[in-house]
Every structure is written in C-alpha cells, then in structure tokens.
Image (cartoon, grey):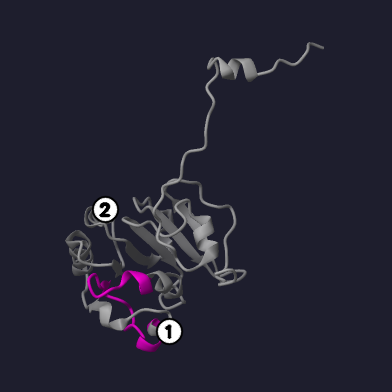
C-alpha cells in the first residue's frame, strides 16, 4: 500500500483551494429567546428584513416570540406599527413583556390595504418595527415588503397561515409553529445559514 500523502505542502503552496465557512451576517436583533438566537446565523431577528411566522391558526401564542424584541424596538422616536391584527393587543399582556403601549400604533385595514400600510410604514423609516397579518400575499407583494424593510432599515414581521410554507418567499427568515408532539418552532429558512435540523420550544432558561 502506498504511503499516504500529506496535503500540507499543497495547501501552503496554494495549489489546493481551502474552503472556509461562510461568515454569518451580523447585526441581528436579540429576540429575548436564547434558543431562537442560537438557531439563527445573525444571532437574532434579521434587522432590516422581512421575517415570516407561519402559524396553524391565529392567537396560538405567536406574539410571545416577538414581544420581547418589540419591547426594545418600540420607542417614542420610532413606534411599532401593528397592521390588521386578528385581535386587539392586550395591554396588560404586552406591557408584561416589556412593550410600552404608548409607542404602539394599531392600524385597522382590510384586503390590499394591509400590505399597502405595511409597505408605507417600512419605507418611512419612522417605525421601530412593523407587524402585519395580510392573509393572502403573493410573491410580488412579499418582495415589495422585503425591499421596503431594507430601504427603511426596519424589521418586518409577517404572520401567515402555515399552508403558505410550500410557497417560495423572499423573506430573510421563515419560522413555523408546530403543534405536535408539542408546541415548538421550526426554522424553515434563514438567510446566511442552514436552518437547524431540530425544532425548539420556547424557554427563558439561560436568558
């Protein structure tokens, strides 16, 4: 059997390309959930991009994932814009999560007005974050929101039915709430890295 050859001389002479791990994008917004931050390449919510939350139904605790970050993003200078929520925000619950409700603007809208209001809020750069429940949104509409979020340097959170999970999306992050065997979140897409294989349950342990 021939003696194994060492690659070291070839690497040192740069005759062999040496791959390196792609650097993760920096500047994520800490979510307040250690398991989620650890699962995302930027260490938190994408800062100036669209994040899509795919749900089995409205009102299943999805806001618990967002409110800790929203407590820091919603300020007097840049309030949070909440467009067409299925239920009026509960002041006590949001306040308990650190959100100052004086810095939250709720917009009632329907149909195409929802996407329009979200896009205007994102492009204005006047909002700390924009949340919206559009119901239906095609690829073109999602791209407009993604571009608006980047233009306005504002994070956007889009809440949609999980039946849209099979639809292609330009969102920087897609995360789905699974209900079986227990409530847990699964990252479907994250820009700058591979989605983790395992889903995770929310826990503040180590926060």
Residue in view at x 31 percent, y 61 percent: 155
Q: Nearer the viewer, residue 70 or 63?
A: 70
Which mark lies nearer to you, 1 or 2?
A: 1
| Stretch in magenta | 70-94
Residue 83: say if magenta: yes
Judged from this view, the residue extending furthest toward the front is 12
Query: Could you tell me if residue 65 is visible in this image?
Result: yes
**What residue is disc 1 on?**
96
Query: Could you tell me if residue 185 is visible in this image?
Result: no
Residue 189 against residue 160 in the figure, above or below? above
Q: Locate residue 199: give its quadrant.
A: bottom right
Name the secondary structure under disc 2: helix
Q: Give the crowd class for mark 1: few <14, some 14-19, many >=20 residues within 10 Å.
A: few
Locate residue 117 relative to residue 168 in the image: left or right: left
Residue 166, percent across and down? 43, 54
Quadrant (top left, top right, bottom left, bottom right) of the C terminus: bottom right
């Amino acid at each position: 059997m021939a003696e194994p050859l060492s690659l070291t001389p070839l690497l040192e002479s740069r005759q062999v390309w040496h791959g390196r791990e792609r650097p993760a994008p920096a500047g994520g917004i800490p979510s307040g959930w250690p398991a989620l931050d650890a699962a995302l390449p930027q260490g938190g919510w994408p800062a100036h991009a669209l994040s899509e939350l795919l749900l089995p139904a409205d009102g299943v605790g999805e806001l618990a994932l967002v409110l800790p970050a929203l407590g820091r993003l919603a300020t007097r200078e840049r309030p949070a814009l909440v467009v067409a929520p299925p239920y009026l925000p509960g002041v006590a619950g949001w306040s308990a999560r650190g959100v100052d409700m004086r810095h939250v603007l709720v917009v009632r809208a329907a149909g195409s007005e929802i996407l329009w209001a979200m896009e205007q809020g994102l492009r204005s750069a006047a909002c700390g974050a924009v949340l919206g429940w559009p119901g239906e949104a095609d690829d073109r509409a999602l791209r407009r929101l993604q571009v608006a979020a980047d233009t306005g340097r504002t994070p956007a959170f889009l809440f949609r039915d999980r039946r849209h999970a099979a639809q292609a999306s330009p969102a920087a992050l897609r995360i789905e709430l699974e209900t079986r065997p227990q409530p847990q979140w699964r990252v479907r897409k994250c820009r700058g890295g591979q989605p983790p294989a395992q889903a995770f349950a929310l826990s503040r342990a180590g926060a």
